[in-house]
Image (cartoon, rainbow, N blue to C red):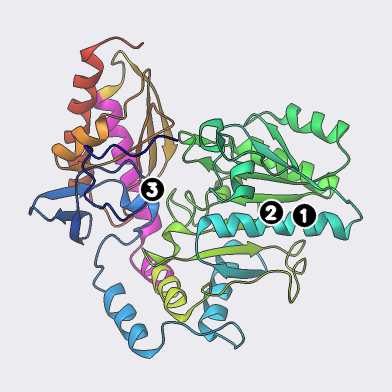
Amino acid sequence: MNAPDPAIHRPMPHVLNTYGRLPIALTHGRGCWVWDTQGRRYLDALGGIAVNTLGHAHPRLVPALQDQVARMIHCSNYYEVPLQEQLAARLCELSGLAGAFFCNSGLEANEGALKIARKYGHDRGISRPQVIVYEKAFHGRSIATLSATGNPKVQKGFEPLVEGFVRVPLNDLDAIREVARTNPDVVAVFLEVIQGEGGINPARADYLRGLRALCDERGWLLMLDEVQCGLGRTGKWFAHQWAGIRPDVMPLAKGLGSGVPIGAIVCGLKAVDVLGPGNHGTTFGGNPLAMRAGVETLRIMEEEGLLANAAAMGELLMGELRRGLQGVAGVVEFRGQGLMIGIELDRPCGVLLQRAADAGLMISVTADRVVRLLPALVIGADEVRGIASILVPLVRDFLAEAPAS
Protein backbone atom coordinates (compact mmCIF):
# COMPACT_ATOMS: atom_id res chain seq x y z
CA MET A 1 0.00 0.00 0.00
CA ASN A 2 1.39 3.41 -0.97
CA ALA A 3 2.10 5.91 1.78
CA PRO A 4 0.25 9.25 1.62
CA ASP A 5 2.08 11.93 -0.33
CA PRO A 6 3.29 14.48 2.26
CA ALA A 7 3.36 17.16 -0.41
CA ILE A 8 -0.46 17.12 -0.69
CA HIS A 9 -1.86 19.66 1.73
CA ARG A 10 -4.86 18.47 3.73
CA PRO A 11 -6.56 21.17 5.82
CA MET A 12 -7.99 18.54 8.21
CA PRO A 13 -5.03 16.13 8.54
CA HIS A 14 -6.48 14.22 11.52
CA VAL A 15 -9.80 13.44 9.81
CA LEU A 16 -9.91 10.29 7.68
CA ASN A 17 -9.67 11.17 4.01
CA THR A 18 -13.00 9.70 2.88
CA TYR A 19 -14.47 12.70 1.05
CA GLY A 20 -13.41 14.65 -2.01
CA ARG A 21 -14.08 17.97 -0.30
CA LEU A 22 -14.13 21.40 -1.87
CA PRO A 23 -11.83 23.95 -0.18
CA ILE A 24 -14.74 25.70 1.56
CA ALA A 25 -15.57 25.79 5.28
CA LEU A 26 -19.07 27.01 6.15
CA THR A 27 -19.77 28.97 9.32
CA HIS A 28 -23.51 29.72 9.33
CA GLY A 29 -26.66 29.92 7.26
CA ARG A 30 -30.02 31.66 7.02
CA GLY A 31 -32.82 30.18 4.98
CA CYS A 32 -31.39 29.06 1.64
CA TRP A 33 -28.12 30.98 2.06
CA VAL A 34 -24.85 29.96 3.72
CA TRP A 35 -21.58 31.81 4.45
CA ASP A 36 -18.00 30.55 4.61
CA THR A 37 -15.01 31.49 6.76
CA GLN A 38 -13.97 34.08 4.17
CA GLY A 39 -17.32 35.84 4.37
CA ARG A 40 -18.48 34.62 0.95
CA ARG A 41 -22.19 33.91 0.50
CA TYR A 42 -23.63 30.93 -1.40
CA LEU A 43 -27.14 30.04 -2.57
CA ASP A 44 -27.66 26.53 -1.21
CA ALA A 45 -29.32 24.34 -3.85
CA LEU A 46 -28.12 21.14 -2.17
CA GLY A 47 -29.75 21.47 1.26
CA GLY A 48 -27.23 19.20 2.96
CA ILE A 49 -28.21 16.56 0.36
CA ALA A 50 -31.97 16.86 1.00
CA VAL A 51 -31.48 17.21 4.76
CA ASN A 52 -32.17 20.88 5.51
CA THR A 53 -35.91 20.77 4.91
CA LEU A 54 -36.52 24.09 6.68
CA GLY A 55 -33.33 25.70 5.45
CA HIS A 56 -30.81 27.06 7.92
CA ALA A 57 -31.64 28.61 11.31
CA HIS A 58 -35.41 28.48 10.82
CA PRO A 59 -36.89 30.97 13.30
CA ARG A 60 -39.40 28.45 14.65
CA LEU A 61 -37.14 25.39 14.73
CA VAL A 62 -34.20 27.00 16.52
CA PRO A 63 -36.04 27.96 19.74
CA ALA A 64 -37.79 24.58 19.86
CA LEU A 65 -34.44 22.77 19.72
CA GLN A 66 -32.93 25.14 22.27
CA ASP A 67 -35.84 24.37 24.58
CA GLN A 68 -35.34 20.63 24.13
CA VAL A 69 -31.57 20.80 24.73
CA ALA A 70 -32.30 22.53 28.02
CA ARG A 71 -34.73 19.75 28.98
CA MET A 72 -33.16 16.49 27.78
CA ILE A 73 -30.98 15.51 24.84
CA HIS A 74 -30.71 11.76 25.34
CA CYS A 75 -32.13 8.98 27.44
CA SER A 76 -31.98 5.22 27.07
CA ASN A 77 -34.62 3.20 25.28
CA TYR A 78 -34.93 1.24 28.51
CA TYR A 79 -37.59 3.83 29.26
CA GLU A 80 -40.58 5.31 27.48
CA VAL A 81 -39.87 8.34 25.32
CA PRO A 82 -43.18 10.19 24.83
CA LEU A 83 -41.86 12.21 21.91
CA GLN A 84 -41.25 8.93 20.04
CA GLU A 85 -44.94 8.12 20.25
CA GLN A 86 -45.85 11.66 19.20
CA LEU A 87 -43.65 11.50 16.09
CA ALA A 88 -44.59 7.90 15.26
CA ALA A 89 -48.30 8.70 15.49
CA ARG A 90 -47.88 11.65 13.14
CA LEU A 91 -45.89 9.60 10.60
CA CYS A 92 -48.54 6.89 10.71
CA GLU A 93 -51.28 9.47 10.22
CA LEU A 94 -49.52 10.95 7.19
CA SER A 95 -48.64 7.59 5.61
CA GLY A 96 -51.58 5.37 6.57
CA LEU A 97 -49.13 2.88 8.10
CA ALA A 98 -49.16 1.35 11.58
CA GLY A 99 -45.92 1.83 13.53
CA ALA A 100 -42.39 3.22 13.48
CA PHE A 101 -38.91 2.39 14.78
CA PHE A 102 -36.47 5.27 15.19
CA CYS A 103 -32.75 5.22 14.41
CA ASN A 104 -30.11 7.75 13.37
CA SER A 105 -29.70 7.72 9.59
CA GLY A 106 -30.96 6.46 6.27
CA LEU A 107 -28.38 3.71 6.26
CA GLU A 108 -29.67 2.42 9.61
CA ALA A 109 -33.27 2.68 8.45
CA ASN A 110 -32.47 0.67 5.33
CA GLU A 111 -30.45 -1.87 7.31
CA GLY A 112 -33.40 -2.30 9.64
CA ALA A 113 -35.74 -2.77 6.68
CA LEU A 114 -33.52 -5.57 5.39
CA LYS A 115 -33.60 -7.23 8.80
CA ILE A 116 -37.39 -7.02 8.75
CA ALA A 117 -37.43 -8.70 5.32
CA ARG A 118 -35.17 -11.53 6.49
CA LYS A 119 -37.11 -12.10 9.70
CA TYR A 120 -40.36 -12.01 7.73
CA GLY A 121 -38.97 -14.73 5.48
CA HIS A 122 -37.74 -16.88 8.35
CA ASP A 123 -41.11 -16.58 10.07
CA ARG A 124 -42.63 -18.03 6.89
CA GLY A 125 -40.20 -20.96 6.85
CA ILE A 126 -37.78 -19.59 4.23
CA SER A 127 -34.26 -20.31 5.46
CA ARG A 128 -32.40 -18.16 2.91
CA PRO A 129 -34.70 -15.20 2.14
CA GLN A 130 -34.07 -13.21 -1.05
CA VAL A 131 -34.79 -9.51 -1.60
CA ILE A 132 -35.26 -8.00 -5.06
CA VAL A 133 -33.14 -4.84 -5.48
CA TYR A 134 -32.31 -2.56 -8.41
CA GLU A 135 -29.67 -1.47 -10.85
CA LYS A 136 -28.35 2.04 -10.01
CA ALA A 137 -29.86 1.84 -6.50
CA PHE A 138 -28.16 3.35 -3.48
CA HIS A 139 -29.22 2.33 0.03
CA GLY A 140 -26.13 3.07 2.14
CA ARG A 141 -22.56 2.08 2.89
CA SER A 142 -22.81 -0.61 5.55
CA ILE A 143 -21.96 -4.07 4.25
CA ALA A 144 -25.62 -5.09 3.90
CA THR A 145 -26.88 -1.83 2.38
CA LEU A 146 -23.80 -1.68 0.16
CA SER A 147 -24.70 -5.15 -1.08
CA ALA A 148 -28.24 -3.97 -1.87
CA THR A 149 -26.82 -0.95 -3.69
CA GLY A 150 -26.46 -1.19 -7.47
CA ASN A 151 -23.15 0.62 -7.94
CA PRO A 152 -20.03 -1.53 -8.50
CA LYS A 153 -17.78 1.51 -7.97
CA VAL A 154 -18.81 1.97 -4.34
CA GLN A 155 -18.82 -1.80 -3.72
CA LYS A 156 -15.29 -2.33 -5.04
CA GLY A 157 -12.81 -3.23 -2.32
CA PHE A 158 -15.43 -4.37 0.19
CA GLU A 159 -16.13 -7.84 -1.13
CA PRO A 160 -17.38 -10.41 -0.29
CA LEU A 161 -20.78 -8.77 -0.38
CA VAL A 162 -23.75 -10.05 1.59
CA GLU A 163 -25.80 -12.67 -0.23
CA GLY A 164 -29.56 -12.70 -0.55
CA PHE A 165 -30.17 -10.05 -3.23
CA VAL A 166 -31.61 -10.43 -6.73
CA ARG A 167 -31.00 -7.40 -8.96
CA VAL A 168 -33.35 -6.15 -11.68
CA PRO A 169 -33.66 -3.01 -13.87
CA LEU A 170 -36.02 -0.23 -12.80
CA ASN A 171 -39.49 0.07 -14.36
CA ASP A 172 -39.48 -3.46 -15.84
CA LEU A 173 -42.34 -5.51 -14.37
CA ASP A 174 -41.55 -8.45 -16.63
CA ALA A 175 -38.17 -8.78 -14.92
CA ILE A 176 -39.93 -8.98 -11.55
CA ARG A 177 -42.40 -11.55 -12.86
CA GLU A 178 -39.51 -13.68 -14.14
CA VAL A 179 -37.87 -13.60 -10.70
CA ALA A 180 -41.21 -14.57 -9.15
CA ARG A 181 -41.49 -17.49 -11.57
CA THR A 182 -38.03 -18.88 -10.88
CA ASN A 183 -37.19 -17.95 -7.28
CA PRO A 184 -39.43 -19.27 -4.48
CA ASP A 185 -37.31 -17.63 -1.74
CA VAL A 186 -38.11 -14.00 -2.56
CA VAL A 187 -39.70 -12.23 0.40
CA ALA A 188 -39.54 -8.52 -0.51
CA VAL A 189 -38.99 -5.89 -3.18
CA PHE A 190 -36.80 -2.97 -2.08
CA LEU A 191 -36.49 0.23 -4.13
CA GLU A 192 -36.19 3.99 -4.04
CA VAL A 193 -39.27 5.68 -5.45
CA ILE A 194 -36.86 8.15 -7.06
CA GLN A 195 -33.27 6.97 -7.20
CA GLY A 196 -31.14 9.79 -5.81
CA GLU A 197 -27.47 8.81 -5.99
CA GLY A 198 -28.24 6.78 -9.10
CA GLY A 199 -29.07 9.93 -11.08
CA ILE A 200 -32.62 11.08 -10.15
CA ASN A 201 -34.34 8.12 -11.81
CA PRO A 202 -38.08 7.91 -10.95
CA ALA A 203 -40.08 4.72 -10.69
CA ARG A 204 -43.15 5.18 -12.89
CA ALA A 205 -46.54 5.36 -11.16
CA ASP A 206 -47.90 2.41 -13.14
CA TYR A 207 -44.80 0.41 -12.24
CA LEU A 208 -45.30 1.09 -8.53
CA ARG A 209 -48.93 0.06 -8.78
CA GLY A 210 -47.89 -3.13 -10.56
CA LEU A 211 -45.34 -3.87 -7.85
CA ARG A 212 -47.96 -3.37 -5.16
CA ALA A 213 -50.29 -5.82 -6.88
CA LEU A 214 -47.52 -8.37 -7.40
CA CYS A 215 -46.35 -8.15 -3.78
CA ASP A 216 -49.94 -8.68 -2.60
CA GLU A 217 -50.31 -11.65 -4.93
CA ARG A 218 -47.04 -13.30 -3.82
CA GLY A 219 -47.15 -12.36 -0.14
CA TRP A 220 -43.97 -10.25 -0.43
CA LEU A 221 -43.17 -7.06 1.44
CA LEU A 222 -43.08 -3.89 -0.65
CA MET A 223 -40.28 -1.81 0.90
CA LEU A 224 -39.95 1.74 -0.43
CA ASP A 225 -36.81 3.70 0.43
CA GLU A 226 -38.03 7.29 0.85
CA VAL A 227 -34.86 8.47 2.59
CA GLN A 228 -34.09 11.12 -0.04
CA CYS A 229 -37.36 11.56 -1.93
CA GLY A 230 -39.75 11.55 1.05
CA LEU A 231 -40.86 14.16 3.56
CA GLY A 232 -42.50 16.60 1.15
CA ARG A 233 -39.68 16.88 -1.36
CA THR A 234 -41.84 15.94 -4.35
CA GLY A 235 -44.90 17.91 -3.25
CA LYS A 236 -46.54 15.07 -1.32
CA TRP A 237 -45.49 13.77 2.07
CA PHE A 238 -44.07 10.64 0.42
CA ALA A 239 -43.19 10.18 -3.23
CA HIS A 240 -45.09 6.90 -3.56
CA GLN A 241 -48.33 8.73 -2.78
CA TRP A 242 -48.34 10.06 -6.34
CA ALA A 243 -49.05 6.46 -7.41
CA GLY A 244 -51.87 6.01 -4.89
CA ILE A 245 -50.28 3.05 -3.10
CA ARG A 246 -48.94 2.22 0.36
CA PRO A 247 -45.76 0.27 1.14
CA ASP A 248 -45.34 -2.36 3.85
CA VAL A 249 -42.01 -0.89 5.00
CA MET A 250 -40.81 2.68 4.45
CA PRO A 251 -37.34 3.84 5.56
CA LEU A 252 -37.05 7.60 6.17
CA ALA A 253 -34.24 9.91 7.29
CA LYS A 254 -32.52 13.01 5.82
CA GLY A 255 -35.17 15.77 5.91
CA LEU A 256 -37.16 14.39 8.85
CA GLY A 257 -35.11 16.33 11.42
CA SER A 258 -34.10 19.38 9.35
CA GLY A 259 -30.43 18.70 10.09
CA VAL A 260 -30.65 16.81 13.38
CA PRO A 261 -29.62 13.16 12.72
CA ILE A 262 -32.68 10.93 12.59
CA GLY A 263 -33.94 7.86 10.78
CA ALA A 264 -37.19 5.92 10.87
CA ILE A 265 -38.63 2.65 9.63
CA VAL A 266 -42.39 3.07 9.22
CA CYS A 267 -44.28 -0.21 8.85
CA GLY A 268 -47.72 -1.29 7.70
CA LEU A 269 -49.79 -4.06 9.22
CA LYS A 270 -47.94 -6.82 7.34
CA ALA A 271 -44.60 -5.82 8.88
CA VAL A 272 -45.33 -3.94 12.08
CA ASP A 273 -45.05 -7.01 14.36
CA VAL A 274 -42.16 -8.78 12.60
CA LEU A 275 -39.55 -7.47 15.05
CA GLY A 276 -39.99 -8.08 18.76
CA PRO A 277 -38.01 -7.28 21.91
CA GLY A 278 -34.37 -8.22 21.40
CA ASN A 279 -34.59 -8.39 17.58
CA HIS A 280 -33.36 -4.86 16.94
CA GLY A 281 -32.17 -1.82 18.84
CA THR A 282 -30.14 1.37 18.95
CA THR A 283 -28.41 3.47 21.60
CA PHE A 284 -28.99 6.93 20.15
CA GLY A 285 -32.03 6.32 17.96
CA GLY A 286 -35.25 7.91 19.18
CA ASN A 287 -33.51 10.32 21.56
CA PRO A 288 -35.63 13.27 22.74
CA LEU A 289 -33.68 15.89 20.76
CA ALA A 290 -34.08 14.05 17.45
CA MET A 291 -37.74 13.34 18.17
CA ARG A 292 -38.42 16.99 18.94
CA ALA A 293 -36.71 17.94 15.69
CA GLY A 294 -38.96 15.53 13.79
CA VAL A 295 -42.15 16.68 15.50
CA GLU A 296 -41.36 20.35 14.93
CA THR A 297 -40.25 19.80 11.33
CA LEU A 298 -43.52 18.13 10.37
CA ARG A 299 -45.56 20.76 12.23
CA ILE A 300 -43.76 23.66 10.55
CA MET A 301 -43.97 22.01 7.13
CA GLU A 302 -47.73 21.66 7.47
CA GLU A 303 -48.40 25.08 8.96
CA GLU A 304 -46.25 26.89 6.40
CA GLY A 305 -47.61 24.95 3.39
CA LEU A 306 -44.23 23.60 2.36
CA LEU A 307 -45.57 20.67 0.33
CA ALA A 308 -47.41 23.05 -1.96
CA ASN A 309 -44.34 25.26 -2.03
CA ALA A 310 -42.12 22.33 -3.02
CA ALA A 311 -44.46 21.48 -5.90
CA ALA A 312 -44.74 25.08 -7.10
CA MET A 313 -41.06 25.98 -6.74
CA GLY A 314 -40.03 22.67 -8.30
CA GLU A 315 -42.22 23.41 -11.31
CA LEU A 316 -40.76 26.91 -11.56
CA LEU A 317 -37.18 25.65 -11.27
CA MET A 318 -37.70 22.92 -13.85
CA GLY A 319 -39.27 25.46 -16.19
CA GLU A 320 -36.37 27.89 -15.80
CA LEU A 321 -33.84 25.13 -16.42
CA ARG A 322 -35.66 23.86 -19.50
CA ARG A 323 -35.99 27.39 -20.83
CA GLY A 324 -32.26 27.92 -20.53
CA LEU A 325 -30.96 24.49 -21.48
CA GLN A 326 -33.57 22.64 -23.57
CA GLY A 327 -32.03 21.73 -26.93
CA VAL A 328 -28.48 22.62 -25.91
CA ALA A 329 -26.06 20.06 -27.34
CA GLY A 330 -24.89 17.81 -24.52
CA VAL A 331 -28.04 18.08 -22.37
CA VAL A 332 -29.56 14.58 -22.35
CA GLU A 333 -32.60 14.81 -20.08
CA PHE A 334 -34.32 16.67 -17.24
CA ARG A 335 -35.70 14.38 -14.52
CA GLY A 336 -37.32 14.57 -11.13
CA GLN A 337 -40.32 15.91 -9.29
CA GLY A 338 -40.86 18.82 -6.95
CA LEU A 339 -37.57 19.98 -5.46
CA MET A 340 -35.67 16.83 -6.45
CA ILE A 341 -34.28 17.62 -9.88
CA GLY A 342 -31.55 16.13 -12.06
CA ILE A 343 -30.07 17.36 -15.34
CA GLU A 344 -28.28 14.57 -17.18
CA LEU A 345 -25.41 15.62 -19.43
CA ASP A 346 -23.62 13.53 -22.04
CA ARG A 347 -20.27 13.63 -20.21
CA PRO A 348 -18.84 13.55 -16.67
CA CYS A 349 -19.39 16.96 -15.08
CA GLY A 350 -17.83 16.81 -11.62
CA VAL A 351 -15.90 20.03 -12.33
CA LEU A 352 -19.20 21.90 -12.06
CA LEU A 353 -19.13 21.51 -8.27
CA GLN A 354 -16.19 23.90 -7.91
CA ARG A 355 -17.31 26.17 -10.73
CA ALA A 356 -20.75 26.55 -9.20
CA ALA A 357 -19.24 27.26 -5.78
CA ASP A 358 -16.96 29.88 -7.33
CA ALA A 359 -20.10 31.49 -8.75
CA GLY A 360 -21.87 31.40 -5.37
CA LEU A 361 -24.02 28.29 -5.83
CA MET A 362 -23.95 24.93 -4.05
CA ILE A 363 -25.03 21.90 -6.08
CA SER A 364 -24.25 18.20 -6.37
CA VAL A 365 -23.14 15.97 -9.21
CA THR A 366 -24.25 12.36 -8.96
CA ALA A 367 -23.83 9.30 -11.20
CA ASP A 368 -20.91 11.22 -12.79
CA ARG A 369 -23.10 13.02 -15.34
CA VAL A 370 -26.14 14.31 -13.47
CA VAL A 371 -26.38 17.76 -11.89
CA ARG A 372 -28.55 17.26 -8.80
CA LEU A 373 -30.59 20.00 -7.09
CA LEU A 374 -32.18 19.45 -3.65
CA PRO A 375 -32.82 22.88 -2.11
CA ALA A 376 -34.66 23.50 1.15
CA LEU A 377 -38.45 23.36 0.90
CA VAL A 378 -38.67 26.96 2.15
CA ILE A 379 -37.09 28.30 -1.03
CA GLY A 380 -38.81 31.21 -2.77
CA ALA A 381 -39.27 32.24 -6.38
CA ASP A 382 -36.43 34.77 -6.39
CA GLU A 383 -34.01 32.15 -5.07
CA VAL A 384 -35.22 29.61 -7.63
CA ARG A 385 -34.54 32.10 -10.40
CA GLY A 386 -31.17 32.78 -8.80
CA ILE A 387 -30.25 29.09 -9.04
CA ALA A 388 -31.13 29.02 -12.73
CA SER A 389 -29.38 32.32 -13.48
CA ILE A 390 -26.10 30.90 -12.15
CA LEU A 391 -26.40 27.28 -13.26
CA VAL A 392 -27.64 27.69 -16.83
CA PRO A 393 -24.61 29.67 -18.11
CA LEU A 394 -22.24 27.39 -16.18
CA VAL A 395 -23.68 24.30 -17.90
CA ARG A 396 -23.74 26.03 -21.30
CA ASP A 397 -20.11 27.10 -21.00
CA PHE A 398 -19.04 23.67 -19.78
CA LEU A 399 -20.75 21.88 -22.68
CA ALA A 400 -19.24 24.31 -25.18
CA GLU A 401 -15.69 23.55 -24.09
CA ALA A 402 -15.25 20.16 -25.72
CA PRO A 403 -17.35 17.33 -27.15
CA ALA A 404 -18.23 14.33 -25.02
CA SER A 405 -15.49 11.73 -24.79
Q: CA distance from mark 2 to mark 3?
A: 31 Å
> Mark 3: few, some, or many residues within 10 Å (few <14, many ≥20)?
many
- Residue contact between numbered discs 1 and 2, judged by CB atoms under 8 Å: yes
Q: Which residue is mark 1?
A: 118
Q: CA distance from mark 3 to mark 1?
A: 36 Å
Q: Is residue 96 visible?
A: no
Drawn side of residue 292 relative to residue 192, left or right: left
Secondary element under disc 2, as helix, strand or loop, is: helix
Look at the image and tell me in which quarter the C terminus lies.
top left
Residue 304 forms part of the magenta stretch: yes
Q: Which residue is mark 3?
A: 311
Point out residue 282 in the picture as x, y percentages from the top left corner: 59, 72
- Between circles 3 and 1, the one closer to the viewer is 1
Drawn side of residue 29 relative to residue 140, left or right: left
Which stretch appears magenta? 298-324
Secondary element under disc 3, as helix, strand or loop, is: helix
Q: Who comes first in sequence, dot 2 or dot 3? A: 2
Which residue is located at x 53 percent, y 72 percent?
285
Give the prevailing secondary structure in the magenta stretch: helix
Type of amino acid at the residue the image marks with label 2: Leu
Point out residue 140 in the picture as x, y percentages from the top left corner: 54, 48
Q: Which residue is mark 2?
A: 114
Which residue is located at x 65 percent, y 60 percent?
112
Type of amino acid at the residue the image marks with label 1: Arg
Q: CA distance from mark 1 to mark 2?
A: 6 Å
